[in-house]
Amino acid sequence: FIESNVLIAKANVDAAYSYSRQVSVERVRRNAVSPSDVLRLMKQPRGVSRLAVRAADYMDYTVELITKSLQQRQKRSINATDLLSEEDLQTIAELTGCTPLQRPPSCKTTPNLNVYRTATSVCNNRENPRWGSSNRPLTRWLPAVYEDGISRPRGWTPSQKVNGFILPMVRVVSNRIVAANNMVPSDPLYSHLVTIFGQWTDHDLSFTPHSPVIRSFNDGIDCDQTCENTEPCFPIQIPSFDPRFGRNSNECIPFFRSAPGCGSGNTGHIFGARNPRQQMNTLTAYFDAGQVYGADDTKARLLRNLTTDEGLLKVNMKYTDDGRELLPFDSMDSRMCATRRRITNDSNAEEVLCFLAGDSRVNENIALTSLHTLFMREHNRLARALAQLNPHWNGEKLYQEARKIMGAYFQVITYRDYLGLIVGPDFMASHLSTYPGYDETVDASISNSFATAAFRFAHLQVQSFIFRLNETYQEHPQYPNVMLHRAFFAPWRVIFEGGLDLIVRGLVGERAKLNTQDDMMSNELRERLFEFSNHVALDLASLNMQRGRDHALPGYNKWRKFCGLSQPQNLTQLAEVLNNTDLAKRLLHLYGTTDNIDLWLGGVSEPFVRGGRVGPLFACLIATQFQKIREGDRFWWEHDGVFTEAQRESLAETSLARIICDNTGITEVPERPLLFRPRGSGYTQCTDMPVFDLRPWQENGPPGPRGPPVGPRGPPGPSSSVHKVAFSVRLANDYPRSGQPIVFPNEVYNEQKSYDSRTGYFICKYPGVYEFAFYCGINKYAASVDLMLNSNRVVHSYTTRRRGFLTASGGIILKLVKGDKVWLVANHKGNGLLKDSFFNGHLLFE
């Protein structure tokens, strides 16, 4: 009885999978693809992940078949588990393939377990081997709030009230709250690289696959042809008088539920407990450069060039970028990237396949593609350089050592250069200050709230264009800026339209979009997502909110409570939290109660924390997640034994600007490319940037120990501003007092006397945009340093241990008005500061 039902379930599931794949691929080949087809194909689980999702579907449908059969026999409603023994239930789990996905693996036979990460990050935590590994459920920091308590999304039954009110259509919310005006505001301080680097970072941490099927197992309804809610279809309803769809539209935007994990939802009881539906994360939770290398052994092997013993990644064998490597083509490609003829209206244009990389979203837009290409090149550069240092290393050793360095790169760049720009200095100080060491009791697994809501804040930083700039950082005359919707799934633009350099210059040399409460999301994402033809384009804001309901994320106030924040109950309180009465009125008009506001929308509606680009709720959730990732990673770059002292010295100097210089034809970039600065105010020549020091990886005779850390170079030369303002100062003695302005009496350069070496203050005389940087050595004590603006902390130092010393460094670009004061202050036993500590600043432009 059980085996026959398992066989029937497998046959039906396999047939649905086959039909769905065949129909989707055929649409692509006939150029009849819709935006929903593109999203579905991009979000398909692949390889090992697909097997895991299929096992969950086998299991779920088997239990459903048995339940129906038992109900017919008993002629009453009955739960399958009421008449099946534990042995029977375990048999179902074994036959469907779910049990192996739940069983803890053995870490005893894993080679080099203490030297290199596994591809899946299994056994990173030796006590809990699956924590943070790929193809595991997203973790939950608050219980799910499914409509039926188990699996049905919030809002599945449109007439059902939640907290006394009916949930509004997500498309209505998108139209009335999220829509941006035609004049999209730009960020005055951050480059567009901040936006794309955020997307790149997200693609190292989480990927939640959709259900692979486009029709249900039971009634065979095709999700593209219905506006009814029927598993796995959860379409986005379109309101009457929609500004895009017109009056009384009967259309809807197709939406497919995220695939469930084994042993959750309706099958949760098989593993001994009532377990609500959980969604999968097919990636690892750690910063391991998985978007370069893949998150399972099969994908990792597919990406390697095993025709030589050089430890290299595969590259494109047909095309190069002016002699530089391009990503290989995806041999399993279904022509999803054959968009050139449609976009250019040139029926003779040559089409190309999609690129292949560690993450399947590599082709989503050409800016993201450029970062994938850049870091593939950096791996191969490292492998070749390591081979020069260690000719006796084989390909496996070269590959693993380069991969290990790459993972450390992203840990340093993300925590030192990126996160502070997003969550602000206060959350950096409270959650992400000096590395406390590895804690095996910390589960680094990615939370559902982070992946589904909080880290999607960056959707509101996306510009309407992909900028493409020439050698002088002006719009390229032959290959000008391209509208975002014309850069989706377009690898041909990288191959045939000038290569990588002009796209990377566009990321560095143009500003990010600034999220404001009046102009949240660009219409390129809200009205034209994956639009290639006249099919119904997707709406990313609606998708985000519908996904949160699909995953049963609790409402806004429950998350505010989780973070220790106030929970507004009425218009006055919400207006105070948002600092915007009009927005508060519109939200309450739609939702009825603050408790029902979708988490993503509530988070992006909040005003920024000081020095950040998210509000306090998302700053809390993002900082909490990154805190867990760092403390729960046995291979974190600062953890003792992962790298040598000398190797950590080199890694601490990791430079995103240097990586750009080493792997493109670009000759000048800002030293801190995430911060926007006009080229006229002093980009740095690549020839003047220190190279990454690989000598500590040389096995025979590494360099001797270094002395205490020394400071960075002084401020750059004169800018294009009318007024000249610059200073570089140094401590005269060790151990200044903590808790008050640090006085740097030794003037390396202070010709304009803008820095007061008696009081420790820089006082602004000329309004404009200034850049400040500091680099402090600290002896013994776990100290940190803050950069203050008018008594407000605007930078919390990036502090790391190096050869018995701590270094506390940081920098920022600030827009100042006359009279503003800037200074440094040491915290927590800060009298450990050494005289080899520097503070620099200069005027960029007025």
Image (cartoon, rainbow, N blue to C red):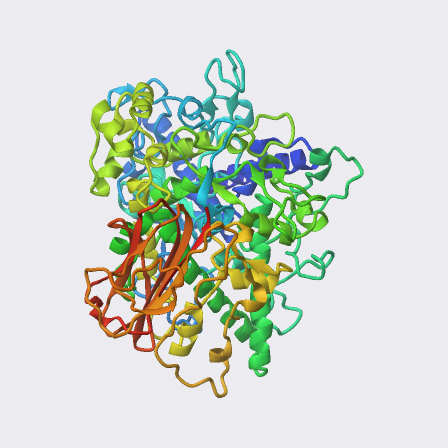
498 and 54: which is toward the camera: 498
The residue lying furthest to the top in this view is 248
Q: Residue at x 38, y 64 (%)?
A: 750
286 and 785: which is toward the camera: 785
Residue 694 point in image, percent of width and height: 51, 75
Q: Residue at x 39, y 81 (%)?
A: 706
Q: How many marks?
A: 0
Quadrant where the image shows the N terminus: top left
345 and 310: which is toward the camera: 345
The picture quadrant where one finds residue 229 is top left
Residue 737 point in image, percent of width and height: 19, 66
Residue 303 point in image, percent of width and height: 59, 60
606 over 424 or under it: above or below: above
The residue lying furthest to the bottom in this view is 701
738 horizontally vs 840: left or right: left
21 horizontally vs 406: left or right: right
Residue 215 point in image, percent of width and height: 53, 30
The picture quadrant where one finds residue 379 is bottom right
253 and 13: which is toward the camera: 253
The picture quadrant where one finds residue 36 is top right
172 over 619 or under it: above or below: above
Q: Residue at x 36, y 21 (%)?
A: 168
783 horizontally vs 812: left or right: left
Does residue 439 appear in this view? Answer: yes
Does residue 360 appear in this view? Answer: no
